[in-house]
Image (cartoon, rainbow, N blue to C red):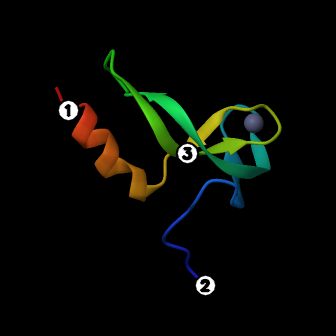
Amino acid sequence: MRKEEWKSGDEGSGQCQHCKTMVKTRYEHRTVRMGGTQVDVPDVLVAVCTVCDHTMKIPRQSFAQLRETGGK
Ligand SMILES: [Zn+2]
């Protein structure tokens, strides 16, 4: 039952670092700031907490997109 490919509008659940509890997540496209850089990558599929709107995680399938755009 492992899902490999997420798409916008999909729902899931996970531990929100901000809420410090299990929450429902929603997948949507957002602009993501690469960690430790000044690079903003537009239209990256991420999982967002439905409670606090915090970007909780970036699915593996989006990593390639981040690497292409940033990496410098
Ligand atoms: Zn949250």
Q: How far apart in space, not on screen, are marks 1 and 2 (Cα)?
A: 33 Å
Q: How far apart in space, not on screen, are marks 3 and 1 (Cα)?
A: 19 Å
Q: Is residue 48 left or right of residue 58?
A: right
Q: Is 15 situated above or below 5?
A: above
Q: Check disc 3 and report its element: helix, strand or loop.
A: strand
- Give the residue pinned by disc 3: 46
* Mark 2 Cβ inside 8 Å of ligand 1: no
Q: Is 24 situated above or below 39?
A: below
Asked where in the image residue 17 lies, by quadrant, the reply is top right
Residue 44 on image: x %, y %: 47, 41
Q: Earlier in the sequence, mark 3 or mark 1?
A: 3
Q: Is residue 44 left or right of residue 13?
A: left
- Give the residue pinned by disc 1: 71
Q: Check disc 2 and report its element: helix, strand or loop.
A: loop
- Give the residue pinned by disc 2: 1
Ligand 1 quadrant assignment = top right
Residue under the image location 37 percent in, 27 percent down: 35
Q: Earlier in the sequence, mark 2 or mark 3?
A: 2
Q: Dot 3 surroundings within 10 Å: few (below 14), some, or many (20 or more)?
A: many
Residue under the image location 72 percent in, 50 percent down: 25
Q: Dot 2 surroundings within 10 Å: few (below 14), some, or many (20 or more)?
A: few
Q: Is residue 60 left or right of residue 51?
A: left
Identify the residue at the far left of this view: 72
Residue 67 on image: x %, y %: 25, 41
